[in-house]
Amino acid sequence: MKIYFYILLLVFSSCSNNNDKEEFSIIIYKLQLPICHELRSPVPSNYYDAQPFRENQHLGSDLNAPTGGNSDLGEPFFSIGEGKVTLAKNIGGGWGNVIIIKHLLKDGGEIESLYGHADEIYVKEGDFVSIGDVIGVIGNNGGMYYAHLHFEIRKTATNIIGGGYSPDISNHYDPTEFILNY
Ligand SMILES: [Zn+2]
């Protein structure tokens, strides 16, 4: 597959038109990101949302095992779809370990999924992941909260972390609804 791309790249790089080159580099970039034909919740279906999207200006969902408390500490969470990891590190503050994955949608658009407060991260920046891959385990950011997965879906792939709360939801989808309706 890779050889095929390189051949295409050679053909197109011989074009004199800069616009063609630019367009082609976008195509190549998008080919590197597999299309999400399906999206799936990052947690098992019996988990509940302790702080839904927009409650207290929350920009995500706080996903918890039905047993509550810290019972889900160390439980796995999953990539919602095919994608590329663009951030995977401890950024401190109220976030702790965060993973951001960029996804290419069926309509050609891109979104980011974000997974916060992980106890452990199993992926690194640049990794390609498949739907359902275990990418980390649920954490409590060093005891700052009861363990939960803070989960967001962002409309544009900016790779900027920002805050988990804001009155401005212009860059966010309701994550649960987005997955249900995809
Ligand atoms: Zn949260």
Image (cartoon, rainbow, N blue to C red):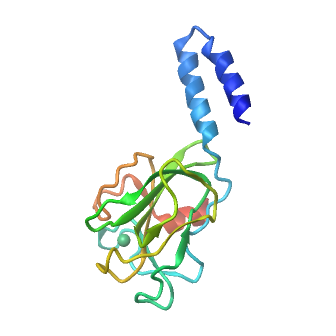
- Image coordinates for residue 45, horizontal then vertical, percent: 60, 79
Quadrant of residue 70 within the rendered picture: bottom left
Q: Relative to the observer, which residue lies in front, 43 or 181? A: 43
Quadrant of residue 116 within the rendered picture: bottom left
Taking the spot 59% from the left edge, 37% from the top edge, the residue there is 30
Q: Relative to the observer, which residue lies in front, 164 or 52? A: 164
Q: Quadrant of ligand 1?
A: bottom left
User: Residue lying furthest top in this view?
Assistant: 16
Q: Quadrant of the N terminus?
A: top right
- Image coordinates for residue 163, horizontal then vertical, percent: 29, 60
Q: Quadrant of the C terminus?
A: bottom right
Taking the spot 39% from the left edge, 58% from the top edge, the residue there is 89
- Image coordinates for residue 54, horizontal then vertical, percent: 36, 68
Q: Is residue 166 left or right of residue 64?
A: left
14 relative to 62, above or below:
above
Q: Relative to the observer, which residue lies in front, 94 or 165? A: 94
Q: Is residue 42 left or right of residue 63?
A: right
User: Residue lying furthest left in this view?
Assistant: 93
Q: Relative to the observer, which residue lies in front, 145 or 60? A: 145
- Image coordinates for residue 98, horizontal then vertical, percent: 40, 62
Q: Is residue 13 left or right of residue 145?
A: right
User: Residue lying furthest bottom in this view?
Assistant: 67
Taking the spot 67% from the left edge, 26% from the top edge, the residue there is 6
